[in-house]
Image (tube, grey):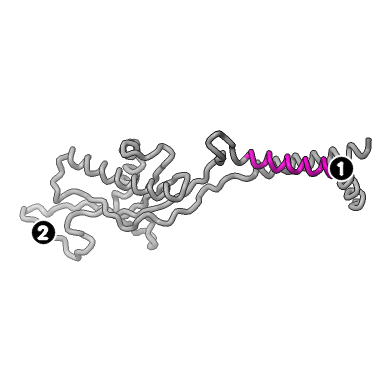
Amino acid sequence: MDLALYGRVLRRFWPLVVTGLVLAAALAALSLVRVTGNGVSYRKPEVWQSQAVLLLNSPGFPWGRIVVPGSASSTPPQYVNLSGLTDLYSQFANSDDVKRIMRGDGAPKSWTITAAPIVPTIQGATLPVISLSGRANSAGDAVSAVEYGKRALIEYVKSQEQLGKIPANQRITLQSMQRATVPVVVQPREKTLAIVVFLAVAIATIGLTFILENL
């Protein structure tokens, strides 16, 4: 490889080389952003995520008792295992009904939420706790998505309990255990296309200089 020869050719056709590199940079930038009358914006936004934690609770805070209170009737009361409802309540959070409540409260369609039971550190154990994650195109919106989703889920559960005419002292409540966490980027902007465009135009420019040299 004769680097000295390559250097002489590139210096001889430096206006073409500079023009090609500027064009390559411009096209690479345009593959990332779009220019409109309203300014410059990215073609594909980042996706940010924040998360909150909710506890399935009931009146009297049963998690603070070592003895379940007795019943006035002869038949002992049957208590619902709240830990076994985390999958169901996660599906409530992921349901279309909760999404409709969010939209009705003003949440944009680009905001999404997902819920899942918290996995305990002890194998085989279960926790009455679910995590609620919100995703949006900015850090602030990700936090807002979590808050909107949390309010919508609580509102949905309350409305269903009211429709079912469940006594107030027998209703399951959703208690916030952890506020929305600091958002993190879970889907960065793709830069592969911009790199490919820049390299393609740069290589084509250098190739053209050697074609002109041979001519």
Q: Please identify the quarter of the rendering in which residue 97 is found.
A: top left
The image shows residue 136 at horizontal and vertical percentages of 45, 45
Which span is picked out in magenta? 14-31
The image shows residue 70 at horizontal and vertical percentages of 10, 59
User: Which residue corresponds to mark 1?
Assistant: 13
Q: Is residue 61 left or right of residue 196?
A: left
Q: How far separated are the C-alphas under marks 2 and 1?
A: 94 Å
Q: Is residue 100 left or right of residue 186?
A: left
In this rendered view, identify the residue nearer to me: 167 or 74.
167
The relative height of residue 97 versus residue 169 in the rendered view (above or below) is: above
Q: Residues within 10 Å of mark 1 (few under 14, many from 20)?
A: some
Q: Earlier in the sequence, mark 2 or mark 1?
A: 1
Write the residue at 36% across / 58% down. 124
Give the dominant element type of the magenta stretch: helix, strand or loop.
helix
The image shows residue 118 at horizontal and vertical percentages of 37, 55
Q: Residues within 10 Å of mark 2 (few under 14, many from 20)?
A: few
Q: Label 1 amino acid?
A: Phe
The relative height of residue 164 versus residue 83 in the rendered view (above or below) is: above
Q: Is residue 20 magenta?
A: yes
Q: Label 2 amino acid?
A: Gly
Give the structural element (helix, strand or loop) at label 2.
loop
Q: Is residue 20 left or right of residue 28?
A: right
Q: Is residue 15 magenta?
A: yes
User: Which residue corresponds to mark 2?
Assistant: 70
The image shows residue 132 at horizontal and vertical percentages of 37, 50
Which of labels 2 and 1 is toward the front? 1
